[in-house]
Each structure stands twice: as C-alpha cells, then as structure tokens.
C-alpha cells in the first residue's frame, strides 16, 4: 500500500494521518512504512 493512498482508505486527511501516526509511533508515515519494510526483510 502506498503512503499517498492510505488517508483515503481510512478516511483521514493527509495531515491528520501524519499527526496521529507521529503521535503514536514517533515516526512520519513514510519513515514508519520504511521501518515496517525493513522488519519484514529481516534487516
């Protein structure tokens, strides 16, 4: 899933997604996605 399409799927504005995800994880949506991909790759 692309970061750009996520706000539409969960019915949040891009800004609201960014602020909420950053508050919960401490990471921007892009950095969070990169972290998940690295974990899945076992890096």
Image: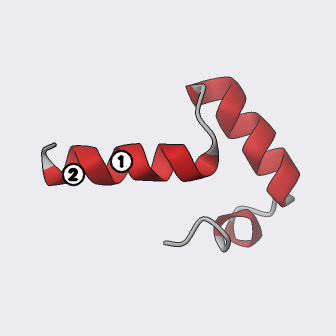
Can you name the residue that lies furthest to the left here?
Answer: 42
Q: Position of residue 22 (x, y in %)?
A: 68, 32
The image shows residue 41, relative to residue 20, as above or below, that is below
> Which numbered tag is attached to residue 36?
1
Element class at badge 1? helix
Front-lying residue, 20 or 42: 42
Residue in the image at 66% along x and 38% along y: 21
- Which numbered circle lies on residue 23? none
Q: Residue at x 17, y 53 (%)?
A: 41
Residue at (71, 62) in percent of width and height: 10
* Quadrant in which the C terminus is drawn: top left
Count of all numbered marks drawn on residues in the image: 2
SS at circle 2: helix
| Left or right position of 12 against 24 | right
Residue 1 position within the rendered picture, expressed as x and y whole percent measured from the top left: 49, 72
Few, some or many C-alpha atoms within 10 Å of disc 2 (few <14, some 14-19, many ≥20)?
few
Distance from label 1 to label 2 (Cα)?
6 Å
Q: Position of residue 4 (x, y in %)?
A: 67, 70
Where residue 13 sits, quadrant-wise, is bottom right
The vertical placement of 38 against 13, above or below, is: above
Coloring scheme of the render?
A: secondary structure
Q: Which mark is residue 40?
A: 2
Asked where in the image residue 28 lies, by quadrant, the reply is top right
Q: Residue at x 66, y 74 (%)?
A: 5
Q: Position of residue 40 (x, y in %)?
A: 21, 51
Q: Is residue 5 left or right of residue 31?
A: right
Left or right? Give the position of 4 relative to 1: right
Looking at the image, is 14 positioned above or below residue 18? Answer: below
> Are the residues tagged 1 and 2 within 8 Å (C-beta)?
yes
């Amino acid at each position: 899933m692309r970061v750009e399409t996520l706000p539409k799927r969960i019915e949040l504005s891009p800004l609201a997604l960014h602020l909420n995800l950053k508050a919960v994880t401490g990471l921007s949506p892009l950095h969070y996605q990169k972290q998940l991909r690295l974990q899945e790759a076992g890096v």
